[in-house]
Amino acid sequence: MSKPLDAIIIGAGHNGLVCAAHLARAGRQVLVLEAASQPGGLGATREFAPGFRASVAHTLPQFGRKLVADLALENHGFRLAASALPTVALCPDGSGHITIADGTLSGACAADTAAYKAYQALLQKFAKAINPFWHKRPPVLGSGGLRDAATLGLFGWNLRTLGKTDLREMMRMIALPARDLMDEYFHSPLLKAALSWDANVGSKLAPRSPNNAVIALLYRMSGDLTGGLPLASGGTGGLMDALAKAACANGAGLRLDSPVAKVVVEQGRAVGVALASGELIRAQKIVSNADPKTSFFQLLGARHLDIQFTHRIRRLRTDGYVAKLHLALDRLPTFTGLAYPGGRLLLAPTMQFIENAYDEAKYGGYARRLPMEVLLPSLQDDRLAPAGQHVLSALVQYAPYTVNGGWDAQRKDFLDNAVASLAQYAPDIRDCIVASELLTPTDLEQQFGLTGGHWHHGEFALDNWWMNRPTYGASQYRTPVSGFYLCGAGSHPGGGIMGAAGSNAAAAILEER
Amino acid sequence: MSPMVRLRASRDIAHIHRGIMPTPFHSRSSRLNLNQQWSQWNGFASAVYYADPQLEYFATRNTCGVFDTSPMRKYRFAGSDAAAMLDRMVTRDVMAQPVDTVAYNVWCTDTGKVVDDGTLFRLGAEEFMLCCADPGYDWFCLAAVGFDAVAITDISEDLAALALQGPTSCALLKALGFAGIDQCKPFQVMRFPFGSGRLLVSRTGYTGDLGYELWVQPQDAELLWDELFTRGGVYGIQPMGDESLEMARVEAGFLAPDVDFHGSLHTVERGHDHSPLELGLGWILNFRKQHFSGRAALIAQKESGNYRRLLKLDIEGNKPAQHSILYADRKCATEIGYITSALWSPVVKANIAYGLVEAKYFGGQIWAEIYHQKELRWQRKVARCTRVTKPFWAPERAKLTPPPDC
Amino acid sequence: MTTRYDAIVIGAGHNGLTNAAYLAKGGLDVLVVEKNDYIGGAAVSRELHEGWIYSNCSYVCSLLRQSIHRDLDLTRHGLMIVPYAGTTNFSRNGDYIAEYTDQAMRYREVRRHSLRDADAMVRYETDLMRYAKLIRHFLLRTPADPTSFKPRDLAELVFMGKKFAGMGAEQVYEFIRFMTMSAGDFLDEYFENELVKALFSTSSIIGTALGVYSPGTAYVLLHHVMGDVDGAVGAWGLARGGMGAISNAIAGALREHGGEIRTGAPVQQIIVRNGRAVGVALDNGEEIRADIVVSNLDPKRTFTVIMDRNDIPADLRKKAEHFKIRGSSGKVNIALTGAPDFPSLPAGHPLRHGSFQFLDTMERMERAYDDWKHGRWSEDPFIEMTQSSMWDPTLAAPGHYFVSCFIQYCPAAVQGGWTPAKRDAFGKTVIDQICNYSPNFRDLIAHMEVRTPYEIEHEIGLTEGNIFQGELTIDQLMFNRPFPGYSQYRGPVKGMYLCGSGTHPGGGVSSACGANSAREILRDLRRPNVVPEDDVDE
């Protein structure tokens, strides 16, 4: 080694890359170690069938302009394939699809269209009030630190600036289940289901689950890349490559195919990592982009932690409930009643339909007809599939991590259900499929090192939020073991391609001297 | 749809034992318990006293006394991670603890508050036994999270135990044929063939005097009792109950859970639990070993120096200061703490106590407001307390190997 | 004919009576008007079958504020709260788990099922106790309005902050988690044994239109264990003479302070003139005037039924319409001619006197909730069966028994609407469930009263039959109860107030809502406070 390393980042997921880029930009010697042979983690664009490529995380609702500018990502090849994908709530009989685009509805009744304006305006107000806090280190109670007290105070102040009426509404609304919220505003069952989607997707929650829906909605409104739902060129991996390049351009090293086996602790301090190959690399600071359970139990080891702390990490709810489906299609399928399937298609006719699927999953089963979020990214980006052919990328709910009988036994049946669910809307879909990839939570766990296959590295819920994410004692990216840090989605603010955890972690590290 | 229910008759169900449970020695101890005075300890009958608590107490200081510690909770930790797991849980260095030794330990929460205390037996490279007064299985399981190769078993009911304590205890064991027992050092463990299996002897106890604890399979419990009492007559053996043990343990400077400290896991009010530093257990905090739970918090507390102290107090007069409030002045204007344990020590001839005193005051004057009764009439006195740093009772013989008169 | 009072309280439920008693004690000339021919609302004792006294709605109490009991001298007015002991939860394998009140017995009983869980109980009970002690500070206080800059609200926020901070930072984090998580997740963090978890989970969904795994139910669990009987936190008691004894005692205190009660007097509307409440109009056309009108009715009924749309702000009307007051519980009250046999418990076992449940896994509870979601009563319902007369000899003749069964889940609306036939089918489901565990139960039934949410709503006036006057979810608790901006008992027009369980601190026979409301009214009238501020907890 030429120069001693300031920091090692374990995992080249987007948060790891963002963290590395920030540290490197500040002049730190940084090395990113990635187990896979390409960077990006869940954002990587992978070839799942010859010529067909897709990313597990397929949209960028939370990505922000500031990061693009700070890291000059456009200089490193970041482009958008689509700036504002419409969301289309598909109606099972093909008539009466509702499209949500540019903050307006089409296809809904007048009352709903009007209500949506008010609803959207209110949520945007709320989102604006809390947006800065996604990008700040959460405060710590009892720390006495001025900066943290200021964050808490600012949070209170921002809420107060909403004014009495809106703040009162927020106090109540923040805890509403999606279902109650939708029922208060809208008539159309299809619209309600569509608008409730982002409140629960990826969690073990459903429209009737209280307390977490609104905060999840606001979280997904945190991006400001375009004001709509953006799609990266080259798949999300396009962004990942740009992040990797940005990190390297700033001087960070990136080693692929280098899984870390252990964090090396000497005298209570993290001093390096041991690779699976046996190689030992030392650094001042070790930053883990892995989920908290992996970080603390596998990489670090309970040996170096207090007992209640390990209990708090252990109790994190990390069972994934969503599967990812990639289909290679030899032509564009026809969605009944939809001229052009170029948006984010939601396949959930009612909130009850989603709830029913959830009820199956609670007991380790899954529904015959599955709620889905479907994208055909190759429509926006022809590099993802051979000419004239297409990729379908879908989130499929609910797929319980601990499925009855195990995923090996259930995989085919689940896939059949997913395809049958698609076929309700696109009757010719079966004829188009030339290859498929189904990533169950177990697959996500094995292929991406995510405990439980939970792509948010743990439930995004109020009880595991902000000061409690992943848990107190580690909510400021520092951990109880000096020299060991977290920078992944298990930390504030959470999952989604956003990079806030990575940049917040970098800020926390840079603040230390 | 109504569920299918398999109705069972009451007699086919293993209901909980009703009433107080007998220890493996109960058939013997109950014969000697002349007034049938029992307390309940973990559900088991524990003699309050047998014939006369005062005489039983003197047996531990003059001859030897036998206390039935079977209701004590005992846990076995086995496996290749056992040492590391325990080392991370307790405050002393388990990795360096030799096989066949015992170490008094405490285990703490993350904030450095005592969960419980107990004695840790290292019985093999990968085998340990932890003995404590209260159940602790849940905490041990929490402490084992992240350690794959450790099996924790509650063996409380698989092991009967007697504490044989007092100056003639070694001689009696020797007379029973346990050859080499006089070479057993304090906190050492020895094994002897006994009855249908073996007897584990540890030179440990709760009286501060020369003494041993005898661990035996339940089926051999009565045999052990009988042998001790058959041969023990000439060594002045006496059964001891809770009351005499309580006197001896305070003299010896030992702590009692839920008397001198409140276990952190069942403490509701903030600050009502205690750190080992507060309890005067700084000597068993090993900050040079690898990480243990509560380490960071305890280092911070130690560095601050700002913590309460459980002090050994010698109090003027002869009225035990049980339940007293402590003050910094004779006028009782400034409250600074309270007494946790107190008694008149018959051997030392002193009015002794433990008092928990606020950080600001432990170096200054300490006064106890004592209430005592004279023929029902309550009297109040304010007595000066003097700090004592050594245990009230620590005879040389307790440390010598071989012990004298053996 | 027009009569005139200083204050009128609509509804003679226990909170209405408490409110009126304190207003009377504060020197007001008070009238309580009640639609039914009897007082008590949901805290009643009625002889529905000759020789048997039924506590046919609420059936046990633990939240009743001791300071109110003492302050209103309820014992002299005939009230005695008797603690009862021991819940036994039967499982399908013929065994059971019992919650003994004695700690050593409870430990051994849980240990019989799981060593780990027996030891974990200490941790569980300590944590719950900590939260209970925190919450209890706020029961007899008016919630602060976090959006207000008034000195009083700021002071109350500081009080709250201090109580929180008093727990220590770690516990504040834990409490924040606790308040927002599900009871199922919470219990999973302590226990491993399904039967143990099932036993403790039942408190988390009583009266609640959520499942054990719905976020927010951990608080509901706390709501059911934060009460106490004589300082024994989590203990439950029975009112000797049935729950009506509570209402009657409070009514006794009310009358002693000069208050009046009129039964059989349903209110049609609260009369508002020039933006202030001036009285009530009864169904029979009679108008009664008063400067203060207090509604003990639930917020939804208050603002959508007995107040004119034009008298209240439009947004309040909307909030009332959106207020979550969901029927999820049924009651089956049964007169028995003998003691039912539960084969797994030996004759003479002390547990025979306690309450019985039949739930061996949380999954069964969750599935019972799934039925409710689909607008059906649970096929495999959860039942809490309280053998009231075992503890209260005044309810039935010797050898006869009154048992009160509380059932979860039963929807407010079933497809096609509730009919007597459907109601009876629901009753049969319940009896079938009990008979699974007690074969001779059916033969002993002398009379039974089946109450779905429909009956509860139509008899007592609780919208949808919700026993708490509104769900106990975060969006409807503390300063959000019933709605943000209306949590300080004041209505939208001058002189109009709320005092029912739909206000802070929520459901349960606590008297706290009525008392807190009275305190605010007296404050507005600039009269000295006569209402206890806090429970003494030394």
Image: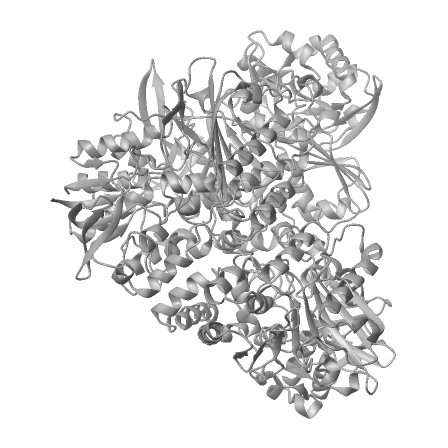
Q: Residue at x 44, y 74 (%)?
A: A118
Query: Is B26 displayed left or right of C131 in the figure?
Result: right
Q: Residue at x 38, y 19 (%)?
A: C394
Residue A155 visible from this viewpoint: yes
Residue occupying the far bottom of the picture: A75
Q: How many marks?
A: 0
Residue C339: x percent and y percent? 53, 17
**C441 or A3: which is nearer to us?**
C441
Query: Is B299 displayed left or right of A268 in the figure?
Result: left
The quadrant the N terminus of chain A occupies is bottom right
Location of residue C288 with respect to B121 vertically, above or below: below
Q: Residue at x 57, y 22 (%)?
A: C442
**A74 or A325: which is nearer to us?**
A325
Location of residue C180 with respect to A498 vertically, above or below: above
The quadrant the C terminus of chain A occupies is bottom right
Residue A386: x percent and y percent? 84, 85
Location of residue B263 with respect to B290 vertically, above or below: above
Residue C417: x percent and y percent? 49, 46
Location of residue C386 with respect to C65 vertically, above or below: above
Residue B268 visible from this viewpoint: no
